[in-house]
Image (spheres, rainbow, N blue to C red):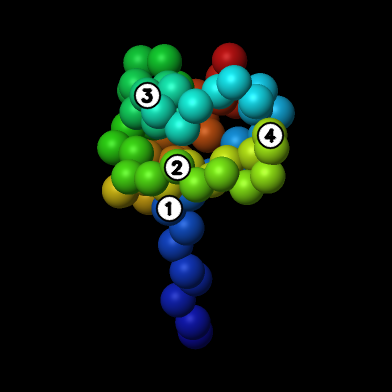
Amino acid sequence: MKRVPICSCILVTGLKKETTDDTIALYFDNEKRSGGKDVSQVERKGKDQALVYFEDPSSKIHLLFKLRAD
């Protein structure tokens, strides 16, 4: 049996050029708004994509359930 690696980030796509890393971090750091919290880093991947890293991998799980419920 092997341990499955835990990923602490999500890929966000469809971002506008004007969207700043701070705006992305603030959105995903707001538990009421996005379901996430404790963003540790935002890393741009191309023009309209970014990786959002969370300090606690369970934040990502709460976020995914919230997005599916909306």
Residue 34 drawn at (x, y percent): 45, 22
Q: What element carries label 2?
A: strand
Could you tell me if residue 28 is visible in this image? no
Residue at numbered disc 4: 48
Q: Is residue 37 left or right of residue 23?
A: left
Could you tell me if residue 45 is visible in this image? yes
Q: Is residue 30 left or right of residue 16?
A: left
Res 42 label: 2
Q: Residues within 10 Å of mark 3 (few under 14, many from 20)?
A: some
Mark in front: 3 vs 1: 3
Res 63 label: none
Q: Residues within 10 Å of mark 1 (few under 14, many from 20)?
A: some
Q: Is residue 10 left or right of residue 23?
A: right
**Tag 2: residue type?**
Val
Res 26 label: 3
Residue 18 drawn at (x, y percent): 59, 21
Are the residues at dot 4 and dot 1 in contact (C-beta closer than 8 Å)? no
Q: Is mark 4 on a helix, strand or loop?
A: loop
Q: In this view, does 54 lie above or below 62?
A: below
Mark 1 or 2, nearer chain start: 1
Q: Is mark 1 on a helix, strand or loop?
A: loop
Mark 4 or 3, nearer chain start: 3
Q: Nearer the viewer, residue 3 or 6?
A: 6
Residue at numbered disc 1: 8
Q: Nearer the viewer, residue 22 or 4?
A: 22
Image quadrant for the C terminus? Answer: top right
- In three-dimensional space, the C-alpha distance between marks 3 and 2, rounded to whole angstroms, equals 10 Å
- Residue sitting at 70 percent across and 28 percent down? 14
Residue 63 drawn at (x, y percent): 46, 32
